[in-house]
Image (tube, grey):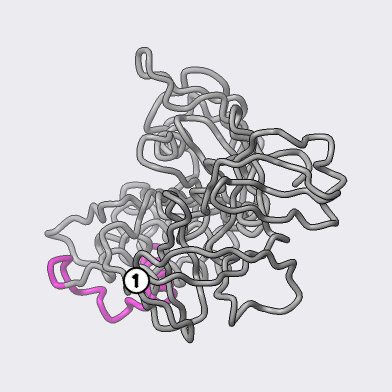
């Protein structure tokens, strides 16, 4: 078991800074997920840890050991790639055992480890098959099994579910979460899918353009995003953003977006009274925009009228694509809501969960922290 430290790590490809001053401590037995769009530096960070790329500056530690100059095979890590990378001419058993044979592990120990890993992953009945005889999900389990038999200090996963269909992705991510609990080992996982990150991680590291934007638990990232990028990236559908102004009227504070004006909760008024007249970005999640007839109790409600542009029935909820002025936004409403395209609808916004950001820096306003 081991912790992992990225200490002011840089990776440069010529003039391009792929990883920019990455400074993270991954705790022993933690499940850390790097998430972000393509080109954000998440996979490069994983490859630096694995020793597949050289560090330009800084250092990486696994446990108490600096591994900058340690060959990949000696870092006590095991990596599961996006491609299964199985040898087509070998059986499942031989694919899983191959790395151990190269390390001259005794035959009895190899047999024990392979069969134990196969039992954990539910592929014991497949050990005699060739990869071409397996489904995509089964091949992915074999790739994970090949990593498990190594008994490494750290598991690395590079978008391992990308080649699976939607149903199998849901099933396999649950299996990986159970595997983490069962093995009690440090997992570091890379994905562009924020749903994967939210459902699996102990903590999530959100990256953009090589820079770490925020690292926190999934719930804290969702509830307290540090900037506009994190707020928009975490959560599905994405947070709604409006250009607005903080205004005072009759002793109350409002968010004035031009096409609507929403009152700020009285409990937050004193936080913003000194900033009246300030231009801000107002953010509200689709989950906090309700049809007026089905607004939940116990919230600070603010009425809003909008025009329905498109409806998407999801079974247990409806996504409404709405227009206020020329601005489109999304609401996630009760499935009993009667809304048709072209009609107007009365909405309730839960102002307890509003988010305000600075339009220049795009950082959250300190009052919300």
Work out whether 32 lies above or below 317: above
* Viewer-closest of 154 and 100: 154
Left or right, 107 with respect to 153, comes to left
- Residue 264 in view: yes
> What residue appears at the point 44 percent right and 48 percent down from the top-left corner?
190
> What residue appears at the point 56 percent right and 67 percent down from the top-left corner?
287
Percent x, y of residue 307: 43, 64
**Residue 127 in magenta stretch:** yes
| Quadrant housing residue 9 | top right
Q: How many numbered circles are shown?
A: 1
* Viewer-closest of 271 and 261: 261
Main secondary structure type of the part rendered in magenta: helix
Residue extent of the magenta highlight: 110-133
Left or right, 354 with respect to 274, comes to left
Farthest residue, direction front: 250
> What residue appears at the point 82 percent right and 51 percent down from the top-left corner?
252
Residue denoted by label 1: 341
* Viewer-closest of 46 and 38: 38
Q: Where's the C terminus, which quadrant?
A: top right
| Quadrant housing residue 266 | bottom right
Percent x, y of residue 134: 19, 72
Work out whether 254 lies above or below 314: above
Percent x, y of residue 240: 51, 53
Give the class, few, some or many, for how many residues have Cα within 10 Å of label 1's Cα (few <14, many ≥20).
few
Q: Secondary structure at mark 1?
A: loop
């Amino acid at each position: 078991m081991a912790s992992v430290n990225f200490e002011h790590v840089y990776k440069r490809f010529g003039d391009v800074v792929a990883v920019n001053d990455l400074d993270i401590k991954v705790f022993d037995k933690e499940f850390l997920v790097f998430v972000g769009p393509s080109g954000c530096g998440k996979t490069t960070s994983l490859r630096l840890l694995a020793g597949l790329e050289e560090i330009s500056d800084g250092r990486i530690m696994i446990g108490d050991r600096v591994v900058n100059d340690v060959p990949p095979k000696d870092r006590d890590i095991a990596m599961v790639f996006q491609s299964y990378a199985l040898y087509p001419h070998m059986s499942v058993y031989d694919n899983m055992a191959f790395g151990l044979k190269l390390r001259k592990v005794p035959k009895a120990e190899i047999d024990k480890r392979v069969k134990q890993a196969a039992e954990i992953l539910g592929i014991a009945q497949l050990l005699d098959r060739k990869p071409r005889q397996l489904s995509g999900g089964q091949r992915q389990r074999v790739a994970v099994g090949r990593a498990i038999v190594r008994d490494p200090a750290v598991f690395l996963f590079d978008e391992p579910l990308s080649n699976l269909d939607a149903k199998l992705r849901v099933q396999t991510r649950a299996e990986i979460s159970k595997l983490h609990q069962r093995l009690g080992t440090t997992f570091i996982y890379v994905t562009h899918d924020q749903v994967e990150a939210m459902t699996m991680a102990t903590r999530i590291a959100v990256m953009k353009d090589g820079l770490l934007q925020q690292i926190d638990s999934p719930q804290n990232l969702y509830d307290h995003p540090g900037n506009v990028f994190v707020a928009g990236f975490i959560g599905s559908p994405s947070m709604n953003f409006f250009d607005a102004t903080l205004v005072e009227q009759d002793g109350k504070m409002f968010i004035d977006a031009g096409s609507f004006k929403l009152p700020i909760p009285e409990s937050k008024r004193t936080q913003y009274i000194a900033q009246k007249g300030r231009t801000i970005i107002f953010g509200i999640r689709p989950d906090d925009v309700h049809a007026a007839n089905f607004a939940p109790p116990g919230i600070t409600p603010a009425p809003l009228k909008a025009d329905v542009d498109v409806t998407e029935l999801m079974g247990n909820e409806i996504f409404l694509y709405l227009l206020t002025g020329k601005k489109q936004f999304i609401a996630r409403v009760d499935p009993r809501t009667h809304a048709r395209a072209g009609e107007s609808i009365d909405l309730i916004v839960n102002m307890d969960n509003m988010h305000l950001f600075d339009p220049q820096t795009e950082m959250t306003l300190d009052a919300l922290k």
